[in-house]
Image (spheres, rainbow, N blue to C red):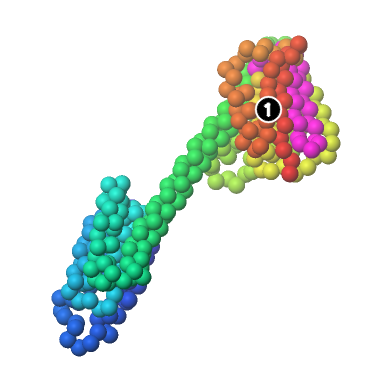
Amino acid sequence: MLTTSSARRDVAITLAVAVPMSVPFFTSPPGHVTVWGCLFNVGAVVPLIWRRRWPFGVAVTVALFATLVSLHHRPGQMLQYSALVAIYTVADLGKRWQRLAFLWAIILTFPPASLILKKNDAAEFMFTVGLPLAAYLLGTLARSNRSRALADASRAAAEERNRIARDMHDVLAHAVSVMIVQAEAGAAVVGRDPAAATRAFDTIADTGRLAEVQLSGVLGVLKGDPPPTAGAIPSLVDRVRRAGLAVDLRVSGAARALPVDADVAAFRIVQEALTNSLKHASGPASVSLDWGDDLAITVTSRGLSPGSGTGRGLIGIRERAAACGGRANAGPTPDGFRVHARLPIP
């Protein structure tokens, strides 16, 4: 789709080309300038205004009129600047067959035309043949750079979709697990311990509200709230404890600044590991944060079956660690399950 700015650039390019293309008509001796020559020159320049919309058609038109200018009014130069712009545009924006057609046209027509009009002057031959080829190569380079940029943008969009999917999985899985545990606990004690049941239902409400806020951030609602990071892990552990899972948090070493992606990954890895513990473990869990050359994260769960769940969360843990230059693994232990991740610290 053409934009106003690109249309303005094309008009500016057309005017810039028109100046040197017109100079020979004003500097030629009297009697050498004809009305037909001027009209042919206009036909060789003006179509450039529409070069982006119809690159091949404009290039053919410009080439035809540029040839007529050279044959009808030889102003001391064969070089047609408008033809160079048209060749560049076809190489950049044209379809494959159009690009090949013009490449062969350059190869088959420019050399003999140069030899005829320049009387076998070797320097002029290289000049008039080399410049069109250079214009074609520059257009090809521009097309290649644009294709690479589009591929990068597409890859970034796919990565962003995967990130959002992982975040939504982490947020929803954690929130739903807490709600289920608390709902079951509240239902079990509502008759004999109303206060405990009330606390369970309050936890459900708090978890739901927190999940709503986190999902708003994941989906890009313009709240300006930063994503949770490693500094929020103690609060996460407290929420899991209130949900009924005994969790021991151990931190060794002095906390240091992490890159943004690693900082978020640290929180999400612990969140997913504790979510699995909430859903599947029958015993307590422990979280260890070791701040050394790297940040080592270890989450162990007692009584957790290695075959529990779909495995999507564990895949997400590995992907998050790899995305920030780290690594993660998970596997069974003699009495449960262990998740270990190591994230780089600059």
Residue corresponding to mark 1: 328
Q: In this view, does 103 lie above or below 297?
A: below
**Can you tell which quarter of the image residue 336 is in?**
top right
Tell me residue 256's x, y (percent).
78, 42
Q: Which residue lies furthest to the right in this view?
A: 253
Q: Which of 111 and 137 is in front in this view?
A: 111
> The magenta stretch spans which residues?
278-301
Badge 1 marks a residue whose secondary structure is strand
Q: What residue type is labelled 1?
A: Ala
State the image coordinates of residue 267 (x, y, percent, origin top left). Answer: 69, 33
Q: Where is residue 89 in the image (x, y as percent from the top left)?
A: 33, 58
Q: Is residue 208 magenta?
A: no
Quick check: can you spot residue 175? no
293 part of magenta stretch? yes
Image point 75% across, 20% down: which residue? 300
Residue in view at x 23 percent, y 68 percent: 116
